[in-house]
Image (tube, rainbow, N blue to C red):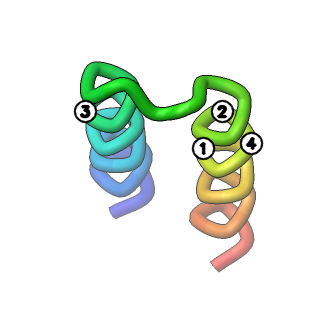
Amino acid sequence: NVKTDLIDAIGETDFRLSEGANADIQMDALIAKFIKIVMD
């Protein structure tokens, strides 16, 4: 399901940001995941 995949990607990104990961890299990765999920 696309909606659950998107929510999962957001949750993973939120976790990484809360652990101190670089915000720019995480946002780029999240956008890439969104595109991949929608294109599949």
Q: Label 3: how many residues lie within 10 Å, few (<14), some (14-19) or many (20+)?
A: few
Q: Are marks 4 and 1 in contact (CB under 8 Å)?
A: yes
Q: Which quadrant would the C terminus be assigned to in this image?
A: bottom right
**Residue pointed to by mark 4:** 28
Say which of 20 and 8 sits in front.
20
Q: Label 1: how many residues lie within 10 Å, few (<14), some (14-19) or many (20+)?
A: some
Residue 23: image x %, image y %?
60, 24
Direction from residue 19 to residue 10 in the image, left or right: right
Q: Amino acid at mark 4?
A: Asp
Direction from residue 37 to residue 12 in the image, left or right: left
How many numbered marks are there?
A: 4
Q: CA distance from mark 4 to mark 1?
A: 5 Å
Labelled disc at residue 15:
3
Q: Label 4: how many residues lie within 10 Å, few (<14), some (14-19) or many (20+)?
A: few
Q: Are marks 2 and 4 in contact (CB under 8 Å)?
A: yes
Q: CA distance from mark 2 to mark 3?
A: 12 Å
User: Mark 2 vs mark 3: which is more N-terminal?
Assistant: 3
SS state under label 4: helix
Can you tell which quarter of the image residue 37 is in?
bottom right
Q: Are marks 2 and 1 in contact (CB under 8 Å)?
A: yes
Labelled disc at residue 27:
2
**Residue pointed to by mark 1:** 30
Q: CA distance from mark 2 to mark 4?
A: 4 Å
User: Mark 4 vs mark 3: which is more N-terminal?
Assistant: 3
Q: Which quadrant would the N terminus be assigned to in this image?
A: bottom left
Can you tell which quarter of the image residue 31 is in?
top right
- Relative to 13, say whether 34 is above or below: below
Residue drawn at 58 percent across, 30 percent down:
22
Direction from residue 8 to residue 13 in the image, left or right: right
Q: CA distance from mark 4 to mark 3?
A: 15 Å
Q: CA distance from mark 1 to mark 3?
A: 12 Å
Q: Amino acid at mark 1?
A: Leu
